[in-house]
């Protein structure tokens, strides 16, 4: 056949694909995928099916074409000679050196874990790479979500990764599970979105650095506050404050020693000399450099300096005939402010060597005094007992004599007294360091701390912590009034805390008590996302404040650093510091004094965080954790919550329900793929968010049963006003069954929307029930309140409610028939809504006209 007629041939179409047997997989490097092709070699030939084998789709297609040409008796196509690929130096070395062969084996094992639910993440060369499973092959995807390379199997993928990135890829490779079904279905889109988020973060950091440079240039003329800087630089005040915090953390800026005109802080460049500030004002930021050492006084000063001071003192000595000076009023000395109790003796000892020596001397002296006193008491007791035994021995005339009995009782009392004396001595020695600590703390820092119970305050501390003020934790109680648990603010290193899970891998920690943590961080993607957001977008005021509640504020730990409340906050703080960020430490540098902690203690803590320390028995920890996770505020009722959720429904909800066929039944509609637009609308409205997605969205992307119940209550609140549902349970039951059908009818247009009509008729229905009369008598009677159902359609709805409101099933059938009629009326514009409502009632054996009949009034009166 001429070549012109064979243009476009052979035509090859893929028909099917399946996995081959074990022998086929071994032959093709672990892949073993078989693909069936339909091949037509020429226009006049019939298409035939052949099964192609090979490691990649291209190999399988070529193998099928070869079989088709052999079956047709055609010669094989000449193959283009290819240069054999030689393994790169890294792969060749990995195949030869034993240690590099071990590196390749480890990487191959990690690549084998990649499947439909897992991906291999590589953080290399300043970018995030991912290895995904796609159609039986492995695909390397870059930051932009585009495919870079495709590999037929784990061995080839490991060799190519070693050739591209080197041996460092083994340590950077991390197998992770997809967050949810959406990422599993569209992994490349998620990767691209994460790269865009990182790019936006880099842009924000660059803009903040640029604004900081502009602020530094603007402060060359003198100190300014944030408002003046924002007006000068034409920037938002919040952005200016973020840049100033960055400058304070980098020691580029500092607090000026002068206030602004409004009494606020001013800022200046750190390379400028300190100017004189107002008397008694100390900036809350970095302090000025220390003054030079004072002149040496006393006997340690050089002899020349002592002689010069003595000579100047004689010269300035006043004469005896000096006129008496005018009498001045005695100056009133202002009492020095006493600082608050700052914690354990450890913090005091580190500040002053004198206090440390005093503490050691007091402990040793009092311990020796106690030992001496105990020895004297013991010797006196033994001496008195010896005299008593000598006196009683003269009265002993036999083993059963009164003297023998008295001697035995005396020996027994003597032994018990000795044991009590030794126990008292041990208890006094054990309490001695704590008593001395409180004595030094009260005498050196704040004597009033002893009055308010310094002993209890000093006991609430942890190893390596710097104590602050006492506080309380409010917990819910059965009586309604919150009960109070004593606690204390303590500054600790975040890395020394013991949360329930590992902050990076979210695996449970072995050193955390069992059955204490109620949250499953290892299985709940929403909890993982919450912890990651705390560390990435740190808002210090949320995790470091003086609130008394347990559900927010500073974490709550025990004396042995076990985190009982705020595990997510504690793990988020640890992740924040491990990423090299200093937002929290900068915040504490300014606000640490509100916790009663010395700001200079921050220099001794690498990753500072303030926690609340409590002292509770181990048996009460599980009960306390349940109380910690319970809020103190009053919960909304189910009806109020449904009304609040109804305000989050999208405006085009009737159109969505109409397009999805919700009038056939709300349950089947929510359980089908037709409810996907409604799920998307709920996500856009904020009802479904990252925090509750795992609870409201199932693996197939549909609503869970809990979410369906919430949507059903929202639809009822959207159809029937809350006050009507609370006043009439029968109206609430009728609306619960028919809400979806009424909303579907509303999607046909405003003329078919019966929600205003139903609300007006419902109010008149309640008035009718309260009067106890029939409908015709009620309409004839007068009323202090105006009638709501005034139009024809509202009058028909009132008659239907009078006849069918107490029968929810019949009322729901009327709503479904009305929704069905709205589809015809909405399409051709032929049906009238009022006539359709009456016909829907008549089709379900409810005649609205019979509500006004005299027979019904007589029957009701009887």
Image: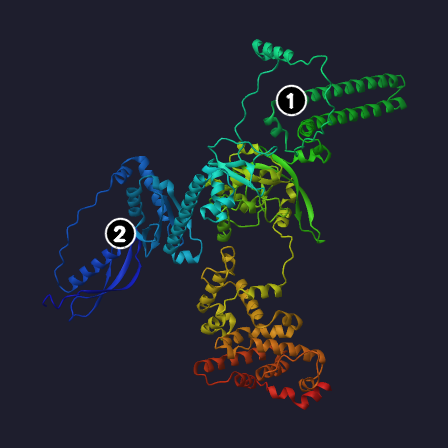
Q: Which residue extends farthest bottom?
A: 854
Q: Which residue extends farthest left?
A: 2
| Front position in the image: 554 or 679 | 554
Say if residue 508 shows up in the picture: no
> In front of the other: label 2 or label 1?
1
822 sits to left or right of 85: right
Q: Which residue is mark 1?
A: 360
Instruction: Label 1, secondary structure: give it.
Output: helix
Q: Can you give x and y, in whole percent of width and height, for residue 391 in the image? A: 88, 17
Instruction: Label 2, secondary structure: give it.
Output: loop
Q: Residue at x 45, y 46 (%)?
A: 233
Q: Quarter of the image holding residue 440?
A: top right
Q: Which residue is mark 2?
A: 28
Q: Residue at x 51, y 77 (%)?
A: 750
| Picture layout, residue 337 above or below residue 552 | above
Q: Can you give x and y, in whole percent of width and height, for residue 46 in the image? A: 19, 70
Q: Quarter of the image holding residue 181?
A: bottom left
| Front position in the image: 515 or 340 | 340
Say if residue 737 shows up in the picture: yes
Figure quadrant of the N terminus = bottom left
Alpha-carbon span between mark 2 and mark 1: 77 Å
Q: Residue at x 46, y 59 (%)?
A: 699
Q: Residues within 10 Å of mark 1 (few under 14, many from 20)?
A: few
Q: Can you give x and y, in whole percent of width and height, for residue 606 in the image? A: 51, 34
Q: Can you give x and y, in whole percent of width and height, for residue 542 in the image? A: 56, 47
Q: Earlier in the sequence, mark 2 or mark 1?
A: 2
């Amino acid at each position: 056949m001429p070549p012109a007629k064979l243009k476009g041939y052979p035509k090859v179409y893929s028909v099917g694909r399946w996995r081959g047997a074990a022998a086929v997989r071994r032959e093709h490097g672990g892949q073993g995928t078989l693909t069936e092709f339909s091949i037509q070699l020429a226009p006049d030939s019939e298409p035939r099916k052949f099964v192609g084998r090979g490691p990649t789709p291209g190999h399988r297609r070529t193998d099928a074409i070869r079989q088709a040409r052999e079956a047709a008796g055609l010669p094989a196509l000449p193959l283009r000679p290819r240069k054999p690929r030689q393994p790169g130096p890294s792969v060749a070395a990995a195949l030869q050196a034993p240690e590099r062969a071990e590196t390749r084996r480890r990487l191959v094992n990690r690549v084998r874990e990649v499947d439909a639910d897992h991906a291999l993440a590589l953080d290399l060369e300043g970018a995030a790479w991912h290895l995904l499973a796609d159609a039986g092959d492995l695909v390397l995807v870059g930051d932009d979500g585009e495919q870079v390379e495709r590999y037929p199997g784990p061995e080839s993928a490991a060799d190519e990764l070693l050739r591209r990135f080197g041996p460092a890829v083994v340590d950077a490779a991390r197998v992770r599970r997809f967050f949810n079904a959406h990422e599993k279905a569209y992994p490349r889109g998620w990767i691209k979105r994460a790269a865009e988020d990182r790019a936006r973060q880099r842009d924000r950091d660059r803009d903040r650095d640029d604004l900081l440079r502009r602020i530094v240039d603007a402060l060359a003329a003198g100190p300014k506050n944030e408002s003046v800087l924002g007006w000068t630089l034409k920037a938002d005040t919040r952005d200016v404050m973020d840049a100033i915090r960055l400058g304070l953390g980098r020691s580029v800026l500092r607090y000026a020693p002068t206030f602004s005109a409004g009494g606020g802080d001013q800022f200046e460049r750190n390379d400028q000399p300190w100017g004189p500030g107002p008397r008694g004002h100390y900036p809350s930021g970095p302090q000025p450099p220390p003054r030079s050492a004072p002149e040496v006084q006393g006997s340690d000063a050089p002899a020349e300096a002592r002689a010069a001071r003595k000579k100047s003192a004689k010269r300035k000595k006043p004469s005896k005939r000096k006129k008496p000076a005018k009498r001045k009023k005695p100056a009133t000395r202002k009492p020095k402010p006493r600082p608050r109790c700052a914690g354990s003796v450890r913090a005091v000892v580190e500040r002053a060597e004198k206090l440390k020596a005093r503490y050691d001397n007091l402990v040793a002296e009092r311990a020796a005094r106690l030992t001496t006193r105990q020895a004297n008491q013991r010797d006196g007791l033994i001496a008195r007992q010896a005299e008593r035994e000598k006196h009683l021995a003269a009265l002993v005339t036999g083993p059963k004599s009164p003297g023998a009995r008295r001697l035995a009782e005396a020996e027994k009392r003597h032994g018990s007294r000795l044991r009590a004396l030794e126990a008292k001595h041990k208890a006094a020695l054990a309490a001695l360091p704590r008593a001395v600590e409180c004595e030094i703390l009260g005498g050196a820092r704040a004597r009033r701390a002893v009055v308010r119970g310094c002993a209890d305050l000093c006991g609430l501390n942890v190893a390596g912590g710097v104590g602050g003020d006492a506080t309380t934790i409010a917990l819910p109680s059965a009586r309604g009034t919150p009960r109070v648990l004593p606690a204390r603010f303590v500054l600790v290193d975040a890395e020394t805390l013991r949360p329930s899970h590992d902050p990076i891998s979210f695996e449970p920690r072995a050193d955390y008590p069992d059955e204490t943590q109620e949250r499953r961080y290892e299985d709940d993607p929403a909890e993982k996302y919450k912890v990651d957001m705390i560390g990435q977008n740190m808002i210090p005021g949320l995790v470091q404040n003086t609130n008394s509640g347990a559900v927010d504020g500073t974490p709550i730990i025990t004396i042995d650093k076990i985190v009982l409340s705020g595990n997510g906050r504690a793990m988020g703080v640890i992740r924040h510091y491990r990423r090299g960020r200093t937002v929290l430490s900068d915040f504490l540098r300014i606000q640490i004094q509100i916790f009663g902690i010395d700001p200079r203690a921050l220099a001794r803590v690498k990753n500072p965080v303030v926690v609340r320390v409590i002292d509770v028995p181990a048996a009460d920890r599980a009960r306390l954790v349940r109380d910690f996770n319970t809020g103190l505020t009053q919960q909304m009722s189910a009806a109020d919550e449904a009304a609040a959720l109804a305000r989050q429904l999208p405006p085009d909800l009737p159109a969505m329900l109409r397009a999805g066929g919700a009038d056939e039944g709300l349950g089947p509609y929510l359980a089908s793929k037709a409810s996907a637009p409604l799920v998307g609308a709920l996500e856009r409205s904020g009802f479904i968010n990252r925090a509750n997605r795992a609870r409201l969205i199932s693996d197939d992307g549909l609503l869970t049963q809990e979410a369906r119940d919430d949507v059903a209550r929202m639809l009822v609140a959207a159809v029937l006003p809350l006050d009507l549902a609370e006043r009439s349970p029968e109206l609430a039951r009728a609306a619960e069954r028919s809400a979806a059908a009424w909303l579907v009818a509303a999607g046909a247009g405003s003329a078919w929307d019966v929600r205003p009509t139903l609300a007006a008729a419902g109010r008149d229905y309640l008035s009718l029930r309260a009067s106890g009369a029939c409908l015709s008598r009620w309409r004839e009677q007068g009323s202090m309140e105006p009638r709501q159902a005034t139009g024809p359609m509202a009058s028909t709805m009132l008659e239907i409610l009078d006849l069918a409101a107490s029968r929810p099933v019949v009322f729901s059938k009327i709503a479904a028939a009305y929704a069905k009629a709205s589809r015809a009326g909405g399409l051709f514009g032929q049906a009238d809504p009022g006539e359709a409502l009456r016909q829907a009632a008549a089709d379900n054996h409810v005649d609205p006209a019979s509500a006004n009949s005299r027979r019904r009034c007589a029957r009701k009166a009887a």
